[in-house]
Each structure stands twice: as C-alpha cells, then as structure tokens.
C-alpha cells in the first residue's frame, strides 16, 4: 500500500535545522530514516511549462501510444514524444516540460496531462509546433506519495501560503536519539493514517496506455481516479473542461484505487483491495457495479472479452498477500468469479492479446497461454528490464526503468526483439 499524508502534515526547505544535511554521514552511530516534505510553489511549476526539442531523461516513466506516436511519460519531469513508424529506430521528436506529470490521454490530436493538481491541454496536431491550449488549475486531486519503509516523520513543517504545497517527500538520516527526543518527529505507524487495444489508432480516435494508466477517455468523458473514487470530466470543449460527477466504490473498505482499464462500456479499476467494476453506459455518470476483493496488494488489471487478469504483488508496501496472477470470469459483470490463480513472484504490469497474456516481473516478460482461463500456462520468459507492456495488434511495447523495448510476435508464444531505446 502506498502511504499518503493529507495536507495537514507538511514541509521542509532543505534539511532539518537540528541535523546535518549529509544523508550519508558515516559518523552516525544509530541512524534512522526521517521523512520530510518537499514544498514547491504552484506559480513556479505553472510558469515552468515549456515545449522544446528532444531531451535526454533519467526518470522512470510510463508509455502511451497514439497512432505512430510513442510517448514516454517521465514521472515528474515531462513527456518525451517519438515518431514510432519504425519501431527498430524510433525518432525522438520533442519534449514537453511538465514537472508534475504522471499520466496522459490523447483524443483527436488533443493531449490531456496532469501537472500536480492542474489539468493541462495541448494541441499536438502539428507535432513540430505543439501548442498549450488550456490549463485548468486545481482541477485534479493531488497528494504526495509517502515513501516506503519509513521509520520517522516530522509533523511541524507545512506550506506558508496558498501558493505552496507538498510536492513530494525525501528521507534524511539522523541519530535515533535525536529523532526520538524531538517533539515534532514521530515514529511511523501505518495505523495512524488512515484500455484493451487492438489495432493502430487514427487521428480521430483515442490512444492507449499501459496497465498502470490512471487517465482514460471514452467519447467526450475524461476519467481519472483519486485514492477513493472515480472522477469524470466533460471534455466536449477542451477550452472549458468541467468535472461532472464523482463515483464512489461501494466495496471500497479502505483500499486505494490505483489503475484504470476500459473494456466496452465498463471500467475496471485496480485497487489495493481488489478489482472494482463501473458501468460507463452513461459516460458522464458512471455507476458502481461490482467488485472482486482480495487481501491487500498492488494490482493493475486488464480485460479481454469476458476474462479479467489481475497481478497482485504482496509484501513490503503492497501488503501481505502472496504474489499471484488472478484470472477472473466477468461474464456476469454484476458478480465476478475467480477462474484460477497462478503464483508468480513480484508481478507488475500486464497486457493481453488473443488469449496470450504478458506479465512483467523481476525475471522479465512472462508469456502465458491463456486460452483456458481455468489453467493459464507459462510458455516463455524473456529476461529484459520491463515493468509494463502494451500489446498492439502489430507488435508489443514494454517499458522498464529508463528503457523502452519493442518486440515482434512470433510462433509458439514467442517474442523477437525489434529494438530498444535506453534513457
């Protein structure tokens, strides 16, 4: 589970005034990790938005495909745009500097991106002359993600004006005795806080993200999630976007919503306590339909026909459940039932195409024969750095830590590397 802190407990400038800024001080006899916030100015990150020629990156990211364009969404850095007509040699075209970006979605050459709590809109119809056409300030929920494996945190540092906010957290090392004796440092306890794609898209359709996507578009509705609910925005006029509804998961029970996936007129939401299904029959008024629940774990979900696939990663920050892939029958959308479970260590993102399931884990990309959902069979494993995949009709794209791989499909559940882009 990702630990997050609401804007009550806030923020430090550089280092705590009572400790050294040297995080690797070998002189500490009994060091502990102290988490402190990083405060930023809204006006500064809004003024820093820029569009430039291709730029290098060293930030982990997500991938998104729109026609022949491949987007690498470098987390909290910006959006790298590639011409992917030749997957063996993608051409790095341009870069949108967007400090607070985590997700994008594209429809009809209009790109929607989050920028911390802002929704930013770009016209990419002329990729050599990208234009920012709208910024909807303070439209999106934003809370900084609390780091894993925290020992102590400080509670008396916070923004001093409406222009400031907690953008993220950092961790410093200090003596345990100093931390334990400081009245504003507390020992961390969790209890104190409570797109299937088939075929290339054209310029008049919607692109596709990986299994960790939080942005989705259906017709004129843009969807995103916060920890607890689904938010729906009307993008009929991208110059005047409005939030039109908020849908709560009836079976929430404390699980955090993490990923989204649209199949036909339903959205499948991966959460730390399971999979939630929402009807999009009325695109502007989604209706909670049902859930498949499990013990706490991190889990994106993808769907093909009447079968949903969920990777559940337990341990550490994600929960105590054993690592696994759940295969779920969603024929009766109101009552999902488990077909089978396959135990796989540390699974991450996944994708499915034509009854072939691709699952990323620490071993690489695992390729399953999923024709029989009651017993999926591991056919091949490819030792590559990969955390998520997008199985296109033409080929498969995988993203890892600072790398994009592209593969051709071959016989016998095989993959053949076309090329890689290393950042």
Image (tube, helix red, strand yellow):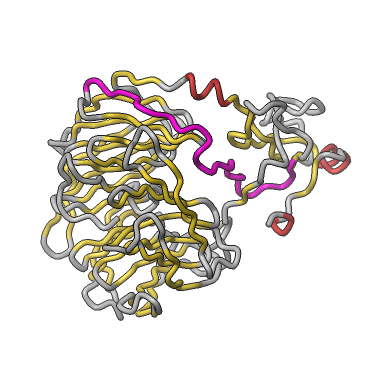
Please name the residue shown 12% across and 57% down the image.
410
Question: Toward the viewer: 397 or 131?
Answer: 131
In terms of secondary structure, what is the magenta stretch mainly? loop
Q: Which residues are magenta?
A: 128-153
Say above or below: 61 vs 213.
above
Residue 282 x %, y %: 34, 60
Q: Residue furthest left?
A: 411
Question: Toward the viewer: 224 or 286?
Answer: 286
Image quadrant containing the C terminus: top left
Image quadrant containing the N terminus: bottom right
User: Is residue 270 within the magenta segment?
Assistant: no
Please name the residue shown 32% across and 49% down the image.
217
Please name the residue shown 70% across and 54% down the image.
193
Quarter holding residue 11:
top right
Residue 2 x %, y %: 57, 52
Residue 115 x %, y %: 46, 33
Quarter holding residue 400:
top left
Residue 52 x %, y %: 32, 18
Question: Toward the viewer: 364 or 307?
Answer: 307
Question: Toward the viewer: 338 or 28?
Answer: 338
Quarter holding residue 119:
top left
User: Is residue 145 within the magenta segment?
Assistant: yes
Please name the residue shown 72% across and 42% down the image.
8
Residue 26 located left or right of residue 115: right
Residue 14 located left or right of residue 123: right
Count every numbered label the image shows and give the total.
Answer: 0
Residue 355 located left or right of residue 266: left
């Amino acid at each position: 589970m990702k630990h997050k802190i609401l804007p009550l407990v806030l923020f430090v400038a550089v280092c705590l005034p009572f400790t050294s800024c040297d995080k690797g001080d070998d002189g500490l006899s009994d060091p502990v990790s102290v988490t402190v916030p990083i405060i930023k100015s809204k006006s500064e990150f809004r003024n820093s938005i820029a569009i430039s020629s291709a730029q290098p990156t060293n930030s982990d990211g997500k991938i998104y495909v729109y026609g022949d364009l491949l987007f690498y969404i470098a987390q909290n850095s910006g959006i790298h745009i590639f011409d992917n007509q030749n997957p063996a040699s993608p051409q790095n075209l341009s870069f949108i500097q967007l400090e607070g970006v985590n997700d994008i979605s594209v429809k009809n050459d209009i790109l929607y991106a989050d920028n911390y709590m802002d929704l930013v809109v770009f016209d990419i119809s002329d990729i050599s002359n990208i234009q920012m056409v709208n910024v909807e300030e303070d439209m999106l929920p934003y809370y900084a993600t609390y780091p894993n494996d925290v020992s102590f945190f400080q509670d008396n540092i916070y923004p001093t004006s409406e222009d400031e906010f907690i953008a993220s957290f950092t961790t410093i090392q200090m003596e345990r005795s100093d931390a334990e004796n400081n009245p504003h440092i507390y020992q961390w306890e969790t209890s104190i806080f409570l797109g299937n794609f088939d075929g290339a898209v054209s310029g008049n359709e919607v692109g596709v993200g990986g299994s960790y996507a939080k942005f989705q578009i259906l017709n004129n509705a843009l969807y995103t999630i916060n920890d607890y609910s689904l938010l729906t925005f009307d993008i009929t006029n991208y110059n005047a976007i409005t939030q039109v509804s908020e849908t709560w998961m009836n079976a929430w029970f404390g699980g955090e919503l993490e990923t989204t996936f649209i199949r036909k007129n339903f959205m499948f939401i991966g959460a730390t306590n399971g999979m939630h299904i929402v009807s999009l029959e009325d695109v502007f008024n989604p209706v909670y339909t049902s859930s498949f629940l499990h013990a706490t774990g991190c889990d994106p979900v993808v769907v093909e026909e009447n079968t949903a696939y969920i990777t559940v990663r337990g341990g550490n920050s994600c929960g105590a459940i054993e690592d696994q892939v759940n295969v779920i029958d969603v024929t009766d959308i109101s009552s999902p039932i488990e077909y089978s479970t396959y135990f796989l260590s540390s699974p991450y993102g996944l994708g499915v195409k034509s009854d072939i399931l691709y699952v990323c884990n620490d071993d690489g990309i695992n390729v399953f024969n999923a024709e029989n959902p009651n017993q999926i069979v591991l056919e091949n494993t490819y030792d590559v750095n990969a955390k998520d995949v997008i199985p296109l009709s033409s080929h498969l794209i995988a993203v890892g830590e600072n790398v994009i791989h592209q593969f051709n499909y071959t016989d016998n559940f095989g993959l053949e590397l076309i090329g890689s882009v290393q950042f």
